[in-house]
Image (spheres, helix red, strand yellow):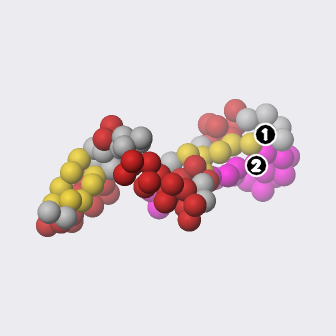
Amino acid sequence: MRTAWRAARRGGQVTVIGMGAKDDLVELSALEIFHSARTLRSSVYGSSDPDRHVPELAAAVLAGSLDLGPLITDRCGLSEAPSAFARMARGEGARTVVLFD
């Protein structure tokens, strides 16, 4: 984030995609923010409207026009969910699907 901030032109905008750990810090001085006139923002789920877009995406998946298979890193049963969360906390398998079979 700091590198992107430094690379942006005066008055530019940096959009952060993805999420760091809760203890990952980015330090910017008040003078630096004022002088550069840059904007730092985040993009959560592509800044979409979940109330509108999630049903649209679900309909596309059910219709077969959107294949989520390539986005899935792992599948597990409900009893394995705690270990899936542990893997996710370590940065492994961020897109595990829990199957309710």
Q: Is residue 67 magenta?
A: no
84 sits to left or right of 95: left
Tell me if label 1 and label 2 are in contact, CB under 8 Å: yes
Residue 44 placement: quadrant: bottom right
Local packing at callout 2 (Cα closer than 10 Å; few below 14, some 14-19, many 20+) is some
Residue type, mark 2 in image: Thr
Task: Return the residue found at the far front.
Answer: 63
State the image coordinates of residue 47 (x, y, percent, origin top left): 61, 53
The residue shown at (36%, 43%) is: 64
Q: Which residues are magenta?
A: 20-42
Where does label 1 land, which residue?
A: 12
Helix, strand or loop for disc 1: loop
Residue 26 at what x, y percent from top left?
59, 52
Q: Which of the 4 quarters of the picture holds residue 69?
A: top left
Q: In the image, what residue type sits under mark 1?
A: Gly
- State the residue position of label 2: 39
The label on residue 66 is none
Q: Where residue 72 sits in the image (x, y, percent)?
A: 30, 45
User: In the rendered view of the protein, which quadrant contains the N terminus?
Assistant: top right
